[in-house]
Amino acid sequence: MTRLLRLAHAVVRRVGEVSRRQLAGLVIGLLVATGVAIASAAGQAAVATCLLALMLAAVLAGVVHLSRRLARVNRSNQETVRELRGAIDQLQRRVIAAVEKERLAAGDRHQELTEVMARAERLTGRGAELLLREQSREIEAMFQLFRAVSPRAPMPAGGGLHPRDLLGLVHIARERRPDLTVALGCGASTVWLGYALAVCGGRLVAVDHDEDRVVRVRARLAEHGLTTVEVRHVPLAELVVDGRTVDWYDVDALDGLADIDLLLVDGTLTPAAADPLAPALHVLGRRLTPAAVVVVDDEPARVAPRQGGGFGLTTRRRLAGRWTALTHPRPAASTIG
């Protein structure tokens, strides 16, 4: 009795888990089986056989339906598997691409770090030694400048000129003691040259095309009481030199400048900066005295023999800083600093 109750309980639990369609099929099957049993008991063999045939047909139909449903489930599972594989492959490619990108970025950062460390090593090694040596030279030049010049007001900053550059100009001015010095371009060097030339009573004429710079330099000269220094504002005009046209100072505004003993050509302040010496000598070369000196930036001076040869300026001399002095042939002078 207990076993029957357990069996009935299990059947009821299973029946509660089936769907309505399955429950309907189960009920119909029970009714048909009941009909077969009743027909057999009543001696109706034909009816029982028909009911059995109907039950068999229903069972076959159920098997076919189940088979088709299983096939659909299988196809759905295969499609899901394919989609899952595609998603996994795509995710794998993205992960590989991200890893490769990070690897390349890490390589670039490693290279940058290596370069920074190499630069730091150079600075702390030979580079630092050279830097300290250069700074020492500039400090020494500054001390020499203030021993040579006693300013009456705060001196202007050198701008593009370092103390050694200024020292070279002051030294050549004190050494040559020129009567007339013409500087193409004005700035801090004009004040320093003004002091150096005031000792020997020389005259300094600075020429510049920048009107604002001319005003500033004139104000500086007034502060220092250098009233004998003349600063001219000369606008630019076209000038033909060796068959090519360049922008240079208006030649008419330079009338009256003759017997020049010292000519300063500062390529950073003058027009035609790519080749500032050629137009300067083209216009002022014939106004130089036989013992004149032309002081020019070191870079333009590399082609100076060709440019100055027509005026006999074939002797070159390195000055302190960035300058080279061009003169007529004479016994070699000692090189400064």
Image (cartoon, rainbow, N blue to C red):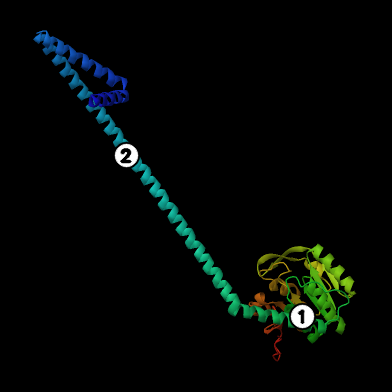
Q: Position of residue 304 (x, y in %)?
A: 66, 78
Residue flagged by tag 2: what amino acid is it?
Val
Report the disc number at residue 81.
2
Residue lying at 77% horizontally and 80% vertically, measured from the top left: 142
Q: Observer-nearest residue: 13 or 296? A: 13
User: Looking at the figure, which quarter contains the C terminus?
Assistant: bottom right
Mark pair 2, 1: CA separation? 84 Å
Residue sitting at x 15%, y 10%: 38
Please tell me the numbered disc located at residue 142: 1
Question: Could you tell whether 61 is left or right of 251 in the image?
Answer: left
The crowding category of the residue bearing disc 2, from other C-alpha atoms within 10 Å (few below 14, some 14 to 19, many at least 20), is few
Residue 288 at what x, y percent from top left? 77, 80
Mark 2 or mark 1, earlier in chain: 2
Give the image quarter of residue 66.
top left
Question: For the residue marked with disc 1, what is the amino acid?
Answer: Met
The spot of residue 225 in percent (x, y) is: 90, 74
